[in-house]
Image (tube, grey):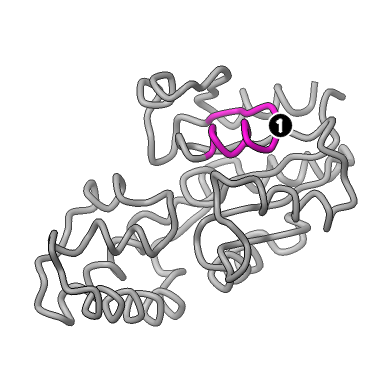
Amino acid sequence: MKYHTAIFDLDGTLLDTLQDLADSTNYALALHHLPTRTVEEVRRFVGNGVGLLIHRAVPEGTDEALEHQVLADFRAHYLVNMEHKTAPYPGVLELLDRLRAAGIRTAVVSNKFDGAVKGLCQAYFGDRVEVAIGESQGVARKPAPDTVFRALAELGSQAEGAVYIGDSDVDIQTAQNSGLPCISVSWGFRDEAFLQEHGATTIVASREELETLLLN
């Protein structure tokens, strides 16, 4: 096989989390009497961590202290409401099972905060994903390579023979900064045209295509 390790982004790649993210964003905005956002607006805001999600969601010029409170309220709401409308994309569980059966190591690295990443991976994937790493203090978030390198270290894997899979421009940059090949998926939060504009070299539109690239 070409790869011994597959490192995945989470939101928009393995899990469709958009509606729960939008619901928690709008809960936090409404709590402070700020205008809410459409699901499509939230789709454009995600990818760089929840801090930037909320920064983009609040009105321009919002007081910094208020923005921090909206973020805190978003985090608190999301942690207990993140499994209502979230689900794996079709075929993802089967893909992870086939990777495990083939001996390919798997990890998730995400810019979502670490508690949510670990909670979602445990809830939806169980032991199908060996390592799950999110945003935490002292570790640079994607597109910095730090979380990818940490995942490789925890797996005991080498960078050579590993591949990174994601759905966004941030993921393309993360793979480049980590020295890994990148497979971009077009079923997530960014479409194929956007991915091509941002330097994607390998794009798949289905789990079957991804499986073929990973297992052959």
- Residue drawn at x 22%, y 68% is 26
**Residue found 40% across the figure and 74% down from its top:** 78
Q: Quadrant of residue 29?
A: bottom left
Vertical placement of residue 208 versus 5, above or below = above
Residue 80, position in %: x, y?
Answer: 44, 80
User: Dot 1: within a 10 Å radius of its alpha carbon, few (fewer than 14), some, or many (20 or more) residues?
Assistant: some
Residue at the spot 13% in from the left edge and 63% down from the top edge: 61
User: Up-down: is 180 above or below 152?
Assistant: above
| Image quadrant in which you'd find residue 201 | top right
- The quadrant holding residue 141 is bottom right
Residue drawn at 54 percent across, 23 percent down: 204
Is residue 132 left or right of 46 when viewed as pictured? right
Residue type indicated by callout 1: Gly
> In screen coordinates, is 91 left or right of 196?
right
Q: Position of residue 189 (x, y in %)?
A: 39, 41
Magenta segment: 171-184
In the image, 169 versus 208, the foreground residue is: 169
Q: Position of residue 156 (x, y in %)?
A: 90, 51
Instruction: Identify the residue under disc 1.
Output: 179
Residue 130 part of the magenta segment = no
Q: Nearer the viewer, residue 128 or 69?
A: 69
Where does the N terminus fall, quadrant-wise?
top right
